[in-house]
Image (spheres, grey):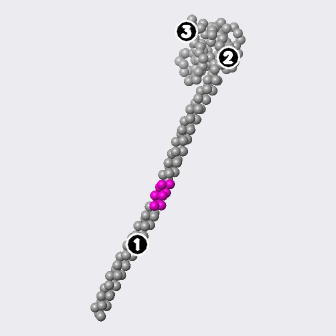
Amino acid sequence: MMESNAGNQNMEEDIVELLTKIDHRLSVIEERTDKIKSIDRKLSELTKLTEAKRDINETKDACNAANKVNVSDLREKILDLQCRSMQNNLVFSGIEEKPEEDTKIIIQNFISNELSIKKDIQFGNIHRFGRADRNKGKPRLIVAKFVYFADLRKVLEAGSKLKEKPQFGMNLQFPY
């Protein structure tokens, strides 16, 4: 009987040892399961972030495409407005520049003397382009806005008289 008690005791120790090993392995499995759950949560968050980034990029691309269209539209509209605002403008070149000059009188005299047009022409605004010190002795251009297109056309038609006077020039104004 003693032997059987000793055998039972060994068996109990073996069972306790096995249970301890099983318990340890279960703890390791639970830790790994928690890690897997944590990784799964992080992967889910990463997937959501990736989807959000894709949505953001799609929205950004759509906005960029719309902006390109808008910018192109705006450029066309600006060019149209510039052309319309300049349609009654003539640019005169080669006219001597004097300090404290009245550009309206200068242009009226030029049209009368050089183009032989004696009609009283009405102007909106007349001025020289740019700063005086930039042209290094050359007279700056003068832009004149004609109130009536018929007057502008008459002056342009008389422009052929300037062929004999190459120091002078006259052109329609266009946007840059």
- Neighbours of disc 2 within 10 Å: few (<14), some (14-19), many (20+): few
Q: Quadrant of residue 16?
A: bottom left
The quadrant in which the C terminus is found is: top right
Asked if one can make out residue 110 in the rendered structure from this viewpoint, the answer is no
Would you identify the image quadrant in which residue 8 lies? bottom left
Quarter of the image where the N terminus is located: bottom left
Between residue 90 and residue 58, name the one nearer to us.
Answer: 58
- Which residue in the structure is indicated by mark 3? 166
Kind of residue sitting beneath label 2 = Phe
Q: Earlier in the sequence, mark 1 or mark 2?
A: 1
The residue under label 2 is: 149
- Find residue 134 and report its horizontal and vertical position in percent: 54, 21
Query: Which residue is at 37% across, 73% downward?
Result: 25
Q: Is residue 48 left or right of residue 96?
A: left
CB-based contact (under 8 Å), mark 3 and mark 2: no
Please tell me whether mark 1 or mark 2 is closer to you in this view: 1
| In this view, the mark in front (1 or 3) | 1
60 inside magenta stretch: no
> Is 128 placed left or right of 51 in the picture?
right
Residue 32: x %, y % from top left: 41, 67
Which of the numbered marks, if any, corresponds to residue 27?
1
Q: Position of residue 108 (x, y in %)?
A: 67, 12
Question: SS at mark 3?
Answer: loop
The magenta-colored residue range is 40-48
* Majority secondary structure in the magenta region: helix
